[in-house]
Image (cartoon, grey):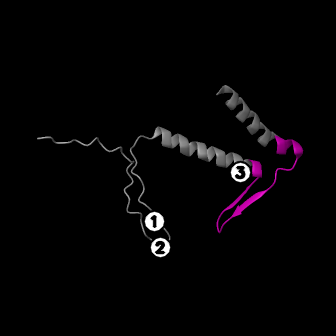
Amino acid sequence: MLKVLVLFLLLLAGVVLGPMVAGHQGYVLIQTDNWNIETSVTGLGIILILSLLVILLAEWILPGDYPDPEPAGDSAGRVDPAPSVPHRRPHARLVHRP
């Protein structure tokens, strides 16, 4: 586990420091009616990874038994009639002998 963590940190350091040393990081512009977001490709990648980690941390910390989402069905709106319960092994048959 420690080796994986060290490898991940080295990979992350390479992704962050590599473009900085090379001098060209790329450019990302997200523009809407009222917003302009300008960042580098490296910065966008870091923002996306941190956002994912925050979402996973919130899901792990917040208690709750969340219900399964409703089945979406196919493109025609048909839903599979099979129940979404896991398959259970049938019980042994009981034979009644008089």
| Outermost residue to the left | 98
Nearer to us in this view, 82 or 46: 82
| Outermost residue to the bottom | 76
Specify start and end residues of the magenta stretch as a single range: 18-42
- Left or right: where 18 falls relative to 86: right
Checking the image for residue 76, the label placed there is 2
Kind of residue indicated by mark 3: Leu
Q: Which residue is mark 1?
A: 73
Could you give the CA–CA distance between mark 2 and mark 1, rounded to whole angstroms?
8 Å
**The residue tagged with tag 1: helix, strand or loop?**
loop
Q: Are marks 3 and 2 in contact (CB under 8 Å)?
A: no
Could you give the CA–CA distance between mark 1 and mark 3, rounded to whole angstroms?
34 Å
**The residue tagged with tag 2: helix, strand or loop?**
loop
Kind of residue indicated by mark 1: Gly
Q: Residue at x 76, y 52 (%)?
A: 41
Nearer to us in this view, 88 or 40: 88
Q: Which residue is mark 3?
A: 44
